[in-house]
Image (tube, grey):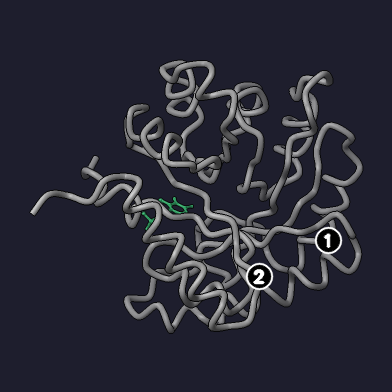
C-alpha cells in the first residue's frame, strides 16, 4: 500500500472537520495546517492541494521555511505563530507572521506593536489562555483576558481576533471537553465586549472532534495532515 498523498490527507481531514461541524450544527471551522518540523516541500505540496493557512511553533524555523518557498507560493499563504513567543523574537515574529496565537503577557503586546511594519496589515492576535490553571504552563489566567485584550485593542498595529488554548493532554480527548467549554464561555464574553473578535483556536489532531462541537472556529492540525513528527 502506498502512503496517501498530501492532497488525499487534506481532503480527508477537511471531510472530518465538516462532519464534526455538521453533526453539531455549527459553522465549519478553518483549518490551520501545523507544519512545524516539516520541510518547505511539505508545505508546498499542501499549498498546491489548496491549503492556505500554516502554523509554526518557532520564529526562526518559520522565517527559514518562508525563505525556502517559491515567493509566488509563499505570497499566497497565511502564517500563524502558535508556539511561545520570547520577547527578543518579537521583531522577527512581527515581520514573518500574519497571526500570533500565543499572546499571554503585556510585554509581548507592546513589543509586537512596536515592531509591526506600519505599511503592513495589522498583525492578527489571539490571547493564549491557561484555562485549567496548569502550573508552569504558557497562557494568561482567565481573569487576565480582559486587561490583555484592552492592551491589544489599544494598539493600531495589532488586531484583536480572539482566544487560543491547549488543554491538558488527557489520553481520553473527551476529558478535554470541559476546558473547551470554558474557553467558549470566555470567548463569548470577550466577543460581546470586542465586536471584531471572531476566532476561537482550539482542537488538534486527536481532539478536534471534541473542540468543534464546543465552538472552535479554527483547528490546528499537524499529525493528521503530515503524519507523525520525527522526534527531536
Ligand atoms: C504541534 C501543535 C499542534 C498540532 O498538533 P497535532 O497533534 O500534530 O495535530 C497544535 N497546536 C499547537 C500549539 C502545537 O504546538
Cα gap from disc 1 to disc 2, whole angstroms: 26 Å
- Residue picked out by circle 2: 27
Say whether residue 145 is left or right of residue 65: right
In the image, what residue occupies the spot 63% across and 82% down?
Answer: 25
**Position above or below: 36 against 121:** below
The location of residue 123, given as percent across then percent down, is 74, 35
Q: In the depicted view, which residue is nearer to us: 36 or 60?
A: 36
Q: Secondary structure at mark 1?
A: helix
Q: In the depicted view, which residue is nearer to us: 136 or 54?
A: 54
Mark 1 or 2, nearer chain start: 2
Residue 76 picture quarter: top right
In the image, what residue occupies the spot 58% across and 27% down?
Answer: 89
Q: Is the C terminus in the top left, top right, bottom left or bottom right quadrant?
A: top left
Q: In the depicted view, which residue is nearer to us: 67 or 43?
A: 43
In the image, what residue occupies the spot 53% across and 24% down?
Answer: 74
* Residue 129: mark: none
Q: Is the N terminus in the top left, top right, bottom left or bottom right quadrant?
A: bottom left
The location of residue 13, given as percent across then percent down, is 40, 60
Residue 143 picture quarter: bottom right
Q: Secondary structure at mark 2?
A: loop
Q: How crowded is the residue under tag 2: few (<14 C-alpha within 10 Å), some, or many (20+)? A: some
As drawn, the residue found furthest toward the left would be 1
The location of residue 49, given as percent across then percent down, is 42, 41
Residue 121 picture quarter: top right
In the image, what residue occupies the spot 68% across and 74% down?
Answer: 184
Say whether residue 172 is left or right of residue 141: left
Q: How many marks?
A: 2
- Residue picked out by circle 1: 146
Say whether residue 94 is left or right of residue 16: right
The location of residue 120, given as percent across then percent down, is 77, 23
Q: How crowded is the residue under tag 1: few (<14 C-alpha within 10 Å), some, or many (20+)? A: some
> Mark 1: is the Cβ under 8 angstroms from ligand 1?
no
Amino acid at each position: 500500500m502506498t502512503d496517501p498523498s498530501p492532497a488525499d490527507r487534506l481532503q480527508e481531514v477537511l471531510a472530518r472537520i465538516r462532519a464534526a461541524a455538521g453533526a453539531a450544527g455549527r459553522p465549519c471551522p478553518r483549518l490551520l495546517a501545523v507544519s512545524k518540523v516539516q520541510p518547505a516541500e511539505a508545505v508546498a505540496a499542501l499549498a498546491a492541494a489548496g491549503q492556505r493557512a500554516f502554523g509554526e511553533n518557532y520564529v526562526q524555523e518559520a522565517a527559514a521555511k518562508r525563505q525556502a518557498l517559491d515567493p509566488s507560493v509563499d505570497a499566497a499563504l497565511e502564517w500563524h505563530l502558535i508556539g511561545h513567543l520570547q520577547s527578543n523574537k518579537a521583531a522577527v515574529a512581527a515581520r514573518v507572521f500574519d497571526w500570533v496565537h500565543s499572546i499571554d503577557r503585556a510585554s509581548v503586546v507592546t513589543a509586537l506593536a512596536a515592531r509591526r511594519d506600519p505599511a503592513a496589515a495589522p498583525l492578527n492576535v489571539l490571547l493564549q489562555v491557561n484555562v485549567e490553571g496548569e502550573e508552569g504552563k504558557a497562557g494568561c489566567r482567565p481573569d487576565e483576558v480582559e486587561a490583555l485584550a484592552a492592551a491589544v485593542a489599544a494598539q493600531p498595529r495589532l488586531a484583536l481576533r480572539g482566544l487560543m488554548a491547549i488543554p491538558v493532554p488527557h489520553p481520553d480527548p473527551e476529558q478535554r471537553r470541559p476546558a473547551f467549554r470554558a474557553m467558549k464561555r470566555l470567548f463569548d464574553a470577550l466577543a460581546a465586549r470586542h465586536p471584531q473578535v471572531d476566532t476561537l483556536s482550539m482542537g488538534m489532531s486527536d481532539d478536534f472532534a471534541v473542540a468543534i462541537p464546543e465552538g472552535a472556529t479554527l483547528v490546528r492540525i499537524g499529525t493528521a495532515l503530515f503524519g507523525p513528527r520525527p522526534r527531536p
